[in-house]
Image (cartoon, rainbow, N blue to C red):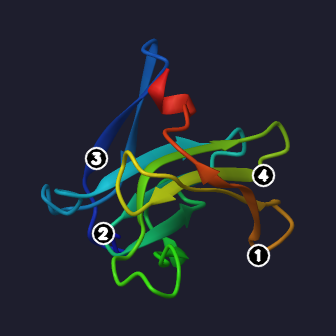
């Protein structure tokens, strides 16, 4: 993610009707090859979820992208102890509720078409800790908000 002083504009469209400039990175290719999503909450906090192919990262800015706090949210696991192939997140949906709490849903499996696990990560505005729930451990091809 961008460090202070390394900014450029990213246009974010809100349901196709309005746009806002949010500072993300000076390097145009900084997010190239990465899956990511960006959400602005009602409290003007900017939340970014991205994967670098190894882990899923969460970043937050409270000053329109001038500075960011970043953390690893999810580390890819293995289907079972006998499998050497790591699981991969193939779908993620992020949003905020009417209290400004962040909700993230991740679908993970060895292969996009194989059975996998769906996680729900939740963090209230008052907490700095994530709560993680496993929603389903044997699901195949879930439909998530971005699929509709």
Task: Name which of mark 1 and mark 2 comes first in the sequence.
Answer: 2
In this view, the mark in front (1 or 2): 2
Residue 110 place in picture, x, y as percent = 39, 63
Residue 9 place in picture, x, y as percent = 28, 47
Residue 64 place in picture, x, y as percent = 49, 53
What residue would you read off at disc 3?
9
Residue at 76 percent of width and 76 percent of height: 128
Q: Kindly identify which numbered label has been placed on residue 52.
A: 2
Q: Is residue 83 left or right of residue 148?
A: left
CA–CA distance in space, label 2 to label 3: 21 Å
Q: Kindly identify which numbered label has been placed on residue 128.
A: 1
Above or below — where is 74 with respect to 7? below
Which residue is nearer to you in this view: 131 or 41?
131
Above or below — where is 50 with respect to 19? below
CA–CA distance in space, label 3 to label 1: 27 Å
Residue 50, located in which quarter of the rendered image?
bottom left
Above or below — where is 84 with respect to 18? below
Circle 1 sits in a helix, a strand or a loop, which is it?
loop
Task: Name which of mark 2 and mark 3 comes first in the sequence.
Answer: 3
What residue would you read off at disc 4?
101
In this view, the mark in front (2 or 3): 2
Residue at 85 percent of width and 44 percent of height: 99
């Amino acid at each position: 993610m961008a460090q202070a002083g390394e900014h450029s504009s990213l246009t974010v469209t809100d349901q196709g009707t309005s746009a806002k400039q949010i500072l993300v990175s000076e390097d145009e290719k900084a997010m190239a090859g990465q899956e990511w999503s960006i959400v602005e909450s009602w409290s003007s906090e900017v939340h970014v979820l991205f994967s670098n192919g190894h882990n899923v990262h969460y970043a937050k800015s409270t000053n329109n992208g001038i500075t960011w706090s970043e953390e690893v949210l999810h580390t890819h696991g293995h289907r079972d102890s006998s499998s050497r192939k790591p699981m991969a997140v193939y779908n993620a949906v992020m949003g905020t509720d009417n209290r400004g709490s962040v909700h993230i849903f991740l679908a993970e499996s060895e292969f996009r078409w194989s059975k996998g696990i769906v996680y729900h990560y939740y963090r209230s505005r008052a907490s700095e800790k994530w709560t993680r729930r496993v929603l389903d451990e044997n699901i195949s091809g879930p439909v998530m908000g971005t699929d509709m």
